[in-house]
């Protein structure tokens, strides 16, 4: 398959992630959308890496996976402490400060 | 990688290693200390930071080179930023010491996270590869997400951390996508190799898309309009000592990243003409919106948050100038702003008293009567932020706007001067309240801890020294960036 298919796939995945972050109000789904954006980048990097016959892209992907995991850890920790305080997963109810 | 190269690389990154080791030591030390021995964590942090500062100074003046297979750069820019970040961290330790006791924060995790964030800043300043830069940005971002939410029983702090985390990771994804696109267009992520490959191959739509995504990603980190919406909420909700750290550190680190990526990587004239107009619009919007919205704020903390956005706009003007004077004045401005902002937030922290509540303008009424020294210091910071001579704020703005005029961006310089005049309205409001209004009789008395006094002393000295003798630091800054603009 040509490179452009993978790139379009990556771009679509990224857009789905962006739309998810901007429109969804459930915290967990927003976190999932951010993961989706990161994985879209991974797809793009790996396809470029294959196309350029250069391993750096794939190694960078491994770094991104590790960073995404630690980001998820912090995100979920914040979700838990928010749920303890407010008993909600809805982002619209996080509004002590003006958004 | 051979052993000599590894040793040479480690030696070149000694300041970073010193901060990392200090962070780890503080983290472990805290477990073994009795509650009364808390001062030991602060003392250890300060000693470690002093060592890192000494290591950074030893590296000054060498030829630009890269270590660890082109991942980290050892050059004037990196050394200057290392010294600045270590200084910011040391001041933050000083100003946080009474705050950590008052709000009952565990000192071990607080100082360790702060040192890890500082490590991230330092790696941003000395990264010469986009992969390295991404990892460094994530390092300091994650540490600051946690710091912002450290008072996790207070809804404000938690909400601030939450918003910071959401928009921070959102922007990181854009930054990453930008790196991936640039990598696809040029086949490398090394900044030096990037600028060479670009000169050989010219622009392509893919490359321009990557550049745009990098601007969005870094724009969020600097909080430049229209990517600023998170900043006021996050700065207002975070614990005040952390807000002080966040306005100085991550902001300077994001500018280090902008200088590395855009002045070094995309610096060639054929490419700078693509991004300079975008940056010019962003700078103008940031200065206007930051200053206008700051006028109507009811809380001094939120006002300073908008003021921090406005100051990012001024520093952005110097980036637009894209010449040696501009790059030098960014460094100068960041140092000046770090002193002004850390100092002002220290006063805020003291006035807020227990539970970090009193941040309204009215809480400053009559401070000139009840605590003349503190009021005088706060007035100095307000005048410095507004850009009055003979303070650092004036010299910084002077250098920035003259660099912009030198490159022919007169409109930006005029907008900058006009918005600075506008900013006098809200900075003067604090001063007027302190001196011309009656104090609130019920308010508890203000007590100054010795470490707060030390932090205030250093920042006051810095603001005045940089304002009265700007030449020395400006000369250093100009020398540090000279390699970016040869000839």
Image: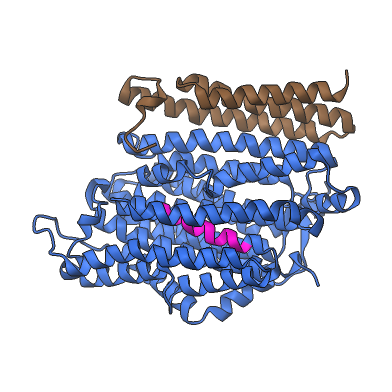
Residue B41 visible from this viewpoint:
no
Tell me: residue B329, above or below residue B263: below
Image quarter hosting the C terminus of chain B: bottom right
Q: Is residue B11 left or right of residue B341?
A: right
In this view of the protein, which residue sits in the foreground, B191 or B354? B191
Tell me: residue A69, above or below residue B465: above
In this view of the protein, which residue sits in the foreground, B116 or B196? B196
| Percent coordinates x, y for residue B435 in the rendering | 20, 70
| Percent coordinates x, y for residue B294 in the rendering | 38, 54
Please give the name of the residue rendered at 52% of the width and 70% of the height, measured from the top-left corner: B397
* Residue occupying the far left of the picture: B441
Magenta residues, as a range?
B306-318
Tell me: residue B209, above or below residue B43: above
Q: Main secondary structure of the magenta part?
A: helix
Query: Is B341 one of the magenta-colored residues?
Result: no
Query: Is B315 one of the magenta-colored residues?
Result: yes
- Give the colouring mode of the picture: by chain
Please give the name of the residue rendered at 78% of the width and 61% of the height, measured from the top-left corner: B65
Please give the name of the residue rendered at 67% of the width and 68% of the height, measured from the top-left corner: B408
Q: Is residue B336 left or right of residue B31?
A: right
The tint of chain A in the picture is brown
The answer to which quarter of the image holds residue B130 is top right
**Which chain appears blue?**
B
Residue B444 visible from this viewpoint:
yes
User: How many badges with numbers are in the image?
Assistant: 0
Q: Is residue B122 left or right of residue B421?
A: right
| Percent coordinates x, y for residue B27 in the rendering | 46, 44
In this view of the protein, which residue sits in the foreground, B219 or B11? B219
| Percent coordinates x, y for residue B353 in the rendering | 23, 53
Tell me: residue B200, above or below residue B452: above
The answer to which quarter of the image holds residue B448 is bottom left
């Amino acid at each position: 398959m040509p490179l452009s298919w993978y790139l379009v796939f990556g771009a679509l995945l990224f857009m789905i992630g962006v739309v998810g972050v901007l429109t969804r109000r459930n915290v967990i789904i927003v976190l999932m959308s951010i993961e989706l954006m990161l994985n879209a980048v991974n797809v793009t990097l790996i396809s470029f890496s294959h196309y350029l016959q250069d391993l750096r892209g794939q190694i960078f992907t491994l770094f991104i996976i590790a960073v995404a995991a630690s980001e998820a850890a912090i995100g979920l920790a914040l979700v838990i402490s928010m749920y303890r305080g407010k008993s909600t997963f809805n982002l619209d109810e996080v509004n002590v400060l003006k958004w | 990688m051979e052993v000599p190269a590894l040793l040479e690389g480690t030696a070149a990154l000694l300041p970073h290693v010193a901060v990392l080791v200090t962070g780890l030591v503080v983290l472990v030390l805290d477990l073994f200390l009795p509650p009364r021995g808390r001062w030991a964590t602060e003392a250890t942090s300060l000693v470690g930071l002093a060592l890192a500062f000494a290591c950074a100074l030893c590296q000054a003046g060498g030829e630009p080179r890269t270590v660890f297979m082109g991942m980290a750069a050892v050059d004037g820019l990196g050394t200057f930023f290392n010294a600045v970040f270590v200084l910011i961290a040391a001041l933050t330790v000083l100003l946080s010491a009474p705050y950590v006791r008052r709000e009952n924060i565990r000192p071990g995790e607080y100082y360790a996270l702060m040192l890890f964030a500082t490590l991230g800043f330092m790696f941003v300043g000395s990264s010469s590869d986009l992969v390295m830069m991404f990892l460094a940005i994530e390092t300091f971002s994650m540490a600051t997400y946690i710091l912002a939410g450290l008072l996790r029983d207070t809804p404000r702090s938690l909400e601030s951390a939450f918003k910071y985390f959401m928009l921070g990771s959102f922007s990181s994804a854009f930054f990453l996508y930008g790196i991936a696109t640039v990598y696809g267009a040029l086949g490398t992520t090394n900044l030096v190799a990037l600028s060479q490959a670009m000169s050989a191959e010219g622009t392509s739509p893919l490359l321009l898309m990557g550049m745009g995504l990098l601007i969005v990603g870094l724009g969020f980190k600097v909080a430049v309009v229209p990517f600023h919406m998170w900043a006021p909420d996050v700065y207002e909700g975070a614990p005040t000592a952390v807000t002080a750290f966040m306005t100085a550190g991550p902001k300077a680190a994001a500018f280090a990243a902008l200088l590395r990526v855009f002045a070094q990587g995309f610096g060639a004239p054929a490419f700078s003409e693509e991004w300079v107009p975008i940056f010019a619009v962003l700078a103008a919007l940031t200065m206007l919106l930051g200053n206008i919205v700051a006028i109507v704020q009811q809380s001094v903390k939120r006002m300073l948050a908008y003021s921090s956005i406005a100051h990012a706009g001024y520093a952005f003007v110097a980036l637009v100038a894209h010449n040696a004077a501009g790059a030098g004045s960014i460094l100068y401005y960041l140092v000046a702003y770090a002193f002004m902002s850390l100092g002002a937030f220290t006063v805020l922290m003291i006035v807020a008293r227990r539970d970090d509540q009193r941040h309204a303008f009215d809480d400053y009424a009559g401070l000139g009567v009840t605590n003349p020294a503190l009021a005088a210091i706060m007035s100095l910071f307000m005048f410095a932020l507004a850009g009055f001579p003979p303070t650092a704020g004036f010299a910084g703005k002077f250098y920035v706007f003259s660099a912009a005029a030198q490159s022919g961006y007169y409109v930006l310089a005029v907008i900058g001067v006009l918005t600075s005049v506008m900013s006098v309205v809200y900075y003067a409001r604090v001063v007027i309240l302190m001196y011309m209004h009656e104090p609130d009789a019920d308010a508890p008395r203000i007590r100054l801890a010795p470490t707060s006094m030390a932090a205030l002393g250093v920042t006051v000295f810095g603001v005045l020294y940089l304002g009265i003798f700007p030449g020395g630091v400006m000369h250093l800054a100009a020398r540090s960036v000279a390699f970016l603009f040869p000839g």
